[in-house]
Image (cartoon, helix red, strand yellow):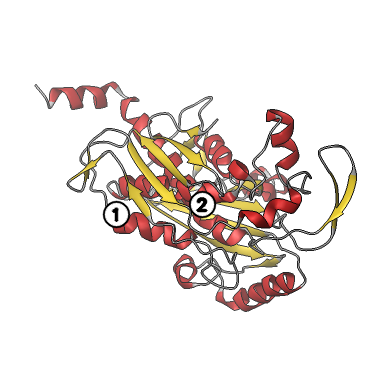
Amino acid sequence: MNSFGLKFRFSTFGESHGAAIGCVVDGVPSGLAIDEEFIQSELDRRRPGQNEFSTARKESDSVEILSGVFEGFSTGTPIAMVIYNRDQKSKDYGSIKDLFRPAHADLTYFSKYGFRDYRGGGRSSARETAARVAAGALAKLLLREVGIEVASGVCAIDGIESSELLFEHAKSSDIYALDPSCEQAQKDAILQAKNDHDSVGGVVCVRASGVMAGLGEPLYHKLDAKLAEAMMGINAAKAVEIGSGAESARLKGSENNDAMRKSGFITNNAGGILGGMSSGAEIFMRVHFKPTPSIFREQQSVDLHGNEVEFSLKGRHDPCVAIRGSIVCEAMMALVLADMLLLNMSSKLSSVKSFYEAKI
């Protein structure tokens, strides 16, 4: 499937080495101010080739809006956006067109379709996530209208864990680090792996503040379930935690329960979600990314004909995919929340009546 969401729905298209990638976003309410500079700034945060901690591929990721916007406002019709690929080096992949790269989607795509675009992974490439960030920027513009803000940052790299989560600091960090006290150690780990022709994994923290209680659709469209689906759909994501996550399995009920007072929850082990719906507390998640599978060491694999081979990759790849992945996590959380926001509008008869009575 190439689409995500029910009311606020987006579909993406394009391949890593194709002419372009892009998205079509449906369900954006009419009258939303479309800040094109903001949309571009979101893409710039994810853009490749910015520093030594990301791939050397140079893409401007300039976005062009094709439809659904008139005189700076959404019209209520589908908003189409396109990002043209400018810096493909498809020849780097000629040597692997007949073999399956370890830990990539080469084998599975070929098994499903009997054919694959070997240039950078084609549709399976993380290049596609630029389109998700563009769609997520629209979702953020909608969420801002009701006071919801989404932020992210890297809280661990190569096992080097943050002791503080400073989301403001992450905005100015080259690797979107949340803790300045261990940022240099995290950078050193990335560069060491890069120099060794290897890669490292990382963990992203993503949060949403200002979320009202009641967002989420029980039982089979729960907020936490859709957030987990959204994050696990990102390239290289291997695990998701909400609130205390795996740690909650080691706690007693008396330790894990979030006590309440008039002012709100005393703790937030639930991560802002109870019974599949937002509780009004901050929504908090961790997303674990595996090491980038594209490494420049000699590896063992098999080719299309079942022959065992040894090979070395060429190309340009991130030594730590979690860095730019953090921006994608942020976009996907915004997209889920925007969808839930619109779905929630018809949950009460009073809400439906107030809308139509205002028109009488």
Instruction: Depth check: give the residue in front, 268 or 103.
Output: 103
Which amino acid, by three-letter code, is at mark 2?
Val
Establish if 240 lies above or below 58.
above
Q: Examine the rendering and report whether any part of residue 266 can be seen.
A: no
Q: Examine the rendering and report whether any part of residue 322 can be seen.
A: yes
Q: Residues within 10 Å of mark 2 (few under 14, many from 20)?
A: many
Q: Which mark is residue 36?
A: 1
Pick out the residue farthest to the left.
360
Q: Earlier in the sequence, mark 2 or mark 1?
A: 1
Q: Position of residue 144 (x, y in %)?
A: 31, 50
Is residue 41 found left or right of 180 in the rendered image? left
| SS type, badge 1 | helix
Is residue 258 found left or right of 293 in the rendered image? left
Establish if 45 lies above or below 110.
below
| SS type, badge 2 | helix
Q: How far is disc 2 from disc 1 in space, using C-alphas?
A: 18 Å
Q: Residues within 10 Å of mark 1 (few under 14, many from 20)?
A: some
Which amino acid, by three-letter code, is at mark 1?
Glu
